[in-house]
Every structure is written in C-alpha cells, then in structure tokens.
Image: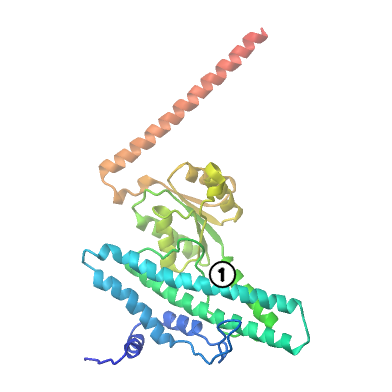
Amino acid sequence: MTHNFTSFADLASYVAANRGNDAQVEAYAGAFVEYDEMAKMSIVAEPERLEMPDEGQARAAVEMVVGTIFDVFRDTRLEAFARDLVWGFVHSFHTVAKRIEGQEDDAAKKLKELIREFDPSENYAVDVEDTQALCQTLQGCREAMECMRDHAAEVYRVETGKPFSPTRGSKVSRVLNASMIDARDFLAARARERDAQFKPTGPVVVFSGGQQWEDHDLLWRGLDSIKARIPEMVLVTTAQNKGCDAIAQAWAAARGVQVILFRLDRGLGAKAAFVRNDRLLSLRPVEAVVCEGSGIQMNLAQKLRKAGVPLHVVRLDQQRNQRSPEEVAKVEARRRDAAERNIARAARAFVKQSTIRSDALHAQD
C-alpha cells in the first residue's frame, strides 16, 4: 500500500503508529509531561501557553534521523563514519539536556533562597510562584530532552553494539509521573529524584579487566549468571574504553543494568589506579569479576580476596574458542615463563636473606 504525506509531522505520526515498543511509548508519554498549562522559559519572561511536542512524533523523528544515517551509509565507504556522526547527534541531545539542567539548578537555588528568606508580601509570593513555574518548565524540558537522548542512544547501541557514553560527566534520566505543587515539596522531591539517579542503591558488583580481550560471549555469560542471582545489581567498572570494561558496559546497556564508571583520578599520578582499587573496595561489593590484565587487576583481586568478597577470576587462556592453538600455546608459554621468573626471584631473595643471616652470625662469633 502506498501512503502520501504532505508534511514531516504526518510522516512522523505514521511511523510512530507503526513502530516502537511499549516501553518506549511509555517512556515518551511519561517524559513529555506538561506540569502546568502555562510555560515559563526564563525568570524575566512572562508565562506562555506553550505545549510540549507530540511524544509520538518526537519518538518517530529520533528513530528516523538516527536510523536513516546508518541505513544510507550501510555497505558504502562512508559506513565507517556513521557511528561518529550518530554519536555526535546523541551527544547534542546530551549537551542540551545538561545545559537545561544547569538552568534548572540555578532556578532551584533561587527558589531555595526565597523560601529561606520568607516575606509575607505579595511581591514575595509572586516571585516564589514565578521561580517555581520556571523550575517546573525547565524540569519538563530536561526530561523530554533526556528521553530523546536515551532513545537515540539505544538505536546507536543496537546499530554499533556499543553503548553511548558522553566524553565527560554522567548520563542519567528518570521519568516522573506527577507534578509538584508546594515549593518545599517540589524542592524535596527534586532532590530525592536526582539523588536516586546519582546514588544507585542496588548491590554492587565490581568488574575490571585488561584491554586485550576478544571473547565477549564468555564475559556476557558470566555477567548473565550473576544478574540471575542478583537481579537488582549495580555494575561498577574501572571505565577503560576498550577490552573487558567496554564489553561489560555493552552488556549492562543491553540488559538495562545501571553502571558506575570509576575513571582514574589523573591528579594522583602513578598511584591513581591503586587508589581507585581502594575506592572500589569501599563500596562493599557483594561480588566481583576480575579479568587477567595488568598488575592493577592483580592488586584489585588481592584486595577483594583479603576482604572476603566472592571473586571470579577470568584468565586470558579461557578464551580458547577465540584463539588458534598457536596463540593458546604462546599464552601458556608466557604464563610458564612468568611463573619461572617468580620462582627464580624468590630463590634469589631466599639465598640473599640466608647470606645476610650467616654473615650476622659470624660477626657475633
């Protein structure tokens, strides 16, 4: 059947009616909420009767724009650049959402100051009402922008196999289903909402691994088994952008698991990675996965064992299905060489210590 459309809105409405799952529809319906029939876009602007965009059209527009870029570039010499273009598109939603959040924070700060400095005058009441209206308008705009960002990020993940991650800062969102009326209740609810996003309360599972890794199925199966036992888990990773950590973050995005990225504090210099390991331990994880990597992973595994945290250690040579027999032999040879070096080092230390004790005894004689 052929359909004719006279505007983008008609096309978007058609796509919205024929695509999208229930969770997406519910997310858009919850995010594109008008807290009041009047919108106040700045502290100096008068309230206006501005409606939110139609959530179905917004959903269709995001999916069409993101999906079309991948479709047009697929199987062409530009396909390699589609991911970068779409990442920029998703990041633009993220950047605008963060800008709105900054304005929302400023308005909330002013509202808090007004409440603290109560004045029974009519002008005071008008200021409180206007500032609260601004907060609510900006909150609605932020939630709508975050909803579209999350939708675009999901299309990006499905197409590329990797979750969208901003260059800096966090990416959080949550759909609210009720408007706030009283100024104090509004501020308290807003604080609770943002705290819940930045402070996940589920059981913490720590994950860390090296960058040289190929067998993603092995790690996904292991993480799936942990999630089956700990459905409300929060995954905490050491935030490397490739290898094991990247695989774990892709798994979390696909399974809807919250992730906390513990990046290195570069200001700490050479000890940054070991300080990060201590901070991971302070989260009191209920379980941990450490994949063979560098001495940093070894240090983390030792600390987890000492703390009595249930630990899964995944070795490089467990990737047998992903490696040729020659590669497996090389890995095992390196492990044997490392073990022999450790034994030789321990023997030299023992001989040296014995010589020192012998010299000390002769000196006493």
Q: Is 336 or 157 nearer to us in this picture?
A: 157
Q: Is 365 or 187 nearer to us in this picture?
A: 187
Instruction: Locate residue 100 relative to residue 129 in the image: left or right.
Output: left
Q: Is residue 292 visible?
A: yes
| Quadrant (top left, top right, bottom left, bottom right) of the C terminus | top right
Q: Residue furthest front?
A: 44
Residue at coordinates 50% horizontally, 66% vertically from top-left?
258
| Quadrant (top left, top right, bottom left, bottom right) of the N terminus | bottom left
Q: Is 23 or 269 nearer to us in this picture?
A: 269
Instruction: Locate residue 309 relative to residue 16 in the image: left or right.
Output: right
Q: Position of residue 331 (x, y in %)?
A: 34, 40
The three-letter code of the residue at mark 1 reads Gln
Q: Position of residue 178 (x, y in %)?
A: 58, 85
Residue at coordinates 35% horizontally, 58% vertically from top-left?
217
Residue 7 vertical position relative to residue 276 in the rendered view, above or below? below
Q: Mark 1 sits on what residue?
A: 197
Q: Is residue 182 visible?
A: no
Residue at coordinates 47% horizontally, 65% vertically from top-left?
228
